[in-house]
Image: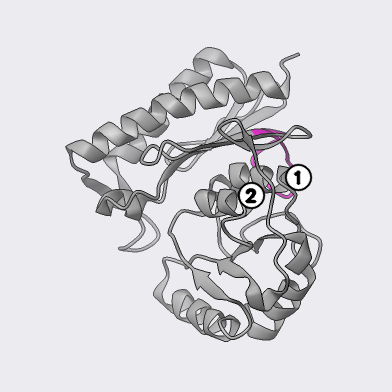
Amino acid sequence: MTTPDELLAIALEIAREAGSLAARRRAEGVEVAASKSSAVDIVTFADREVEALVRKRLAERRPGDGFFGEESDATTSETGLTWIVDPIDGTVNFLYGIPMYAVSIAVVEGGPDPLTWKALAACVVNPASGEEFTAVRGGGAHLGTATLRVSAPASLSQSLLATGFSYDPSRRREQGESVARLLGVVRDIRRAGAASLDLCYVAAGRLDAYVERGLSPWDHAAGVLIAEEAGAVVLTPSGAPASRELTFVAAPAIADDLGKALAEAGF
């Protein structure tokens, strides 16, 4: 049986190749291929090309495993393992040349439902910065060779929170109103535009918490495992795993207070 460490090695090797391809396409100039849920929810030709590369490499290395990516059809697992892939997380950043995008790959035990899967190994690679975040269940989280550990803020009022917004304009306005209410109870709020990296930043202590509604499985699969292995609280205030309903990742010191603040803000 392949171990989680071996699965991580496969994921990281493929993510590095995929990241190099994405960086080359960014340097050549990015072209929008289509819109998805709204006019501002875009996919580039590079997104599709990078996912095709990841899918091909995984099929070569792990035939029979399931695949669930953002830009192509899912395949059912014959082995009990499924790869959850975001080829370029932060596509709008990628389009604009903002160096906050990443290749995100996780392998989970089970199918593509985050409410039932068990993540085994994950990596998030930022081609622009060269940073590689990794984790294996039970083996900790790392940035390169350095072990990651979440922050220990003194209070919610001294905590840096990150979030993201829907592509739907009406939903985005509602989220903005909730975030405005949260601004009064935290140190400040960041919106970087790449959920996988935000989650890794919580793991690295660069952020104290990250919350967002509406994330797809490929947005959070890798980052949540990395944050969890770095010591973050990754269950929602109601005790649920990350899902479209809510992704909640926080330093333990503020998790309870943040949950109460979210409820009061109507988040």
2 vs 67, nearest the viewer: 2
**Residue behind mark 1:** 116
183 inside magenta stretch: no
Can see residue 113? Answer: no
Label 2 Cα crowd, 10 Å radius (few <14 / some 14-19 / many 20+): many
Q: What residue range appears in magenta?
A: 108-121
Q: Quadrant of residue 211?
A: bottom right
Q: Position of residue 105 (x, y in %)?
A: 54, 35
Indicate the amino acid at tag 1. Answer: Thr
Q: Residue at x 75, y 34 (%)?
A: 137
Q: Closer to the observer: label 1 or label 2? A: 2
Relative to 246, 15 lies left or right: left
Q: Position of residue 87 (x, y in %)?
A: 43, 38
Residue 20, above or below 159: above
Numbered circle sitting on residue 203: 2
* Quadrant of the rendering where the C terminus is positioned: bottom right
Q: Residue at x 75, y 78 (%)?
A: 260
Residue 6, above or below 228: above
Q: CA distance from mark 1 to mark 2?
A: 23 Å
Q: Position of residue 41 (x, y in %)?
A: 36, 58
Relative to 210, 250 lies left or right: right
Q: Earlier in the sequence, mark 1 or mark 2?
A: 1
Q: Position of residue 71 (x, y in %)?
A: 42, 41
Q: Residue at x 56, y 52 (%)?
A: 201
Q: Quadrant of residue 265?
A: bottom right
Label 1 Cα crowd, 10 Å radius (few <14 / some 14-19 / many 20+): few
* Colouring: one colour
42 vs 155, nearest the viewer: 155
Residue 52, above or below 125: above
Indicate the amino acid at tag 2. Answer: Ala
